[in-house]
Image (cartoon, grey):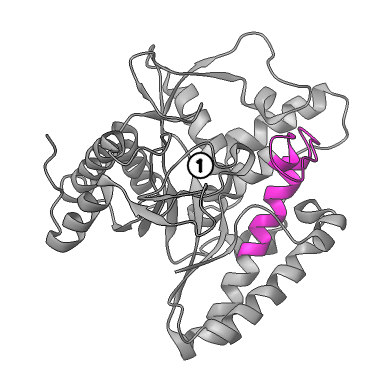
Amino acid sequence: MVTMQHFDLPRKLQQLGGFTNSIIVKYFEEYANLLYQRFGDRVKYWITINQPAEFCVQSYGSSNHAPGINAHGIGEYLCAHNALKSHAVAYRLYKSKYYNLFKGHVGISLNSPFFYSDTNDMVTVDRALQFSLGWVAHPIFSSKGGYPSVMFDQIAKNSEKEGRLRSRLPEFSADWIEKIRGSADFLGLNYYTSRYVEISIEPIGDNPSIVRDKSYKEVIKPVWVKSASEWLYSFPQGLGDILKWIKNEYNNPDVIITENGWSDKGELEDDGRIAYFHDHLQQVSNAISNDGCNVKAYTAWSLIDNFEWSSGYTEKFGLYFVNMSSPRRERIPKKSTRFIKELITTCVIPEIH
């Protein structure tokens, strides 16, 4: 399995505007064509883009990640719009030119928490899911195509209040809706954590911004176990619930869990990571066995400790510790490698004590 694009772009393309410039769609198609030509005989699973909603918000709607454009309320929507088009042309190219040669599969990886409400406010829960996962999933996996109606209506309403002549959310032509709809053989899911949501009466976030368009606040429960990352709390039930939501919302597509992992400070006795894997794998097993979800594979994030974007090397997600103080950068197996090895060998979730 190979991912074509994971967050940042070559500098020359970024100087043209990156994913806010529609020219990126043609460049992405040419790039995908080259990859298919060179590696198609060996790669059977392609992920076009990893977490487009995440990098579009963090890179184009804020300054959290490179290139830090921070055109909030506009940049993130332009970015996701062109990312969806880029994904679709790469998918259609493979199907028309390479599928008969290589018989591979092309999908996209999306990230999202699951959301809950203390007051059983399912309208706000659905809004949160549509603004998070549905933003990119609905155009590809829904029977109707296009953006979720709650996003379309809310952003148009806010844009009108701001005195704009048209919505800040770009609109797909009928032709593009059809090109994007159904343009995936599988849904790659990156799941880490969940949140509770509550509607916000007063406007929140920058004006304009996706935070203000959402109009809800995300809440963390103090009883949840916290990782070494500020945003990551363990809530395994959320993985089972989001798998069931995907099944019901998108007619049970094939799902590959492409990321699921836990950060710490690099301990070799990483019992917290083992507990996280155990509990989340149990949710996956239940979703398959009890709920009929079409989960085809599970990937632990990650093989080794790696560079975590703006957090650098301060947060460790790896099954293998990397000795950054040594010029040889030795890889040292953590306790969790034994858990994963037993899982792979036996195809049974190991018991933990």
Residue 266 as seen in the image, left or right of residue 46:
left
In the image, 320 versus 275, the foreground residue is 320
User: At x 68% / y 59%, what residue is drawn?
Assistant: 174
Q: Residue furthest top?
A: 202
Screen quadrant of the C terminus: top left
User: At x 53% / y 79%, what residue is drawn?
Assistant: 95
Residue bearing mark 1: 133
Q: Which residue lies furthest to the bottom in this view?
A: 101
* Residues shaded magenta: 59-87
- Residue 21 position by quadrant: bottom right
Q: How crowded is mark 1: few (under 14 residues within 10 Å), some or many (20 or more)?
A: many
User: At x 78% / y 22%, what residue is drawn?
Assistant: 207
Q: In this view, does 24 lie above or below 125?
A: below
Secondary element at image label 1: helix
Q: Where is residue 204 in the image (x, y as percent from the top left)?
A: 68, 16
Q: Position of residue 214 (x, y in %)?
A: 62, 26
Residue 335 as seen in the image, left or right of residue 12:
left
- Residue 212 position by quadrant: top right
Residue 332 as seen in the image, left or right of residue 188:
left
In the image, 166 versus 294, the foreground residue is 294
User: How many numbered markers are drawn?
Assistant: 1
- Residue 149 position by quadrant: top right
Q: Is residue 169 above or below residue 47?
A: above
Three-letter code, disc 1: Leu
- The answer to whether residue 63 is visible is yes
Residue 167 is a magenta residue: no
- The answer to whether residue 147 is visible is no
Q: Where is residue 169 in the image (x, y as percent from the top left)?
A: 73, 40
Q: Position of residue 275 (x, y in %)?
A: 24, 36
User: At x 80% / y 59%, what residue is drawn?
Assistant: 11
Screen quadrant of the N terminus: bottom left
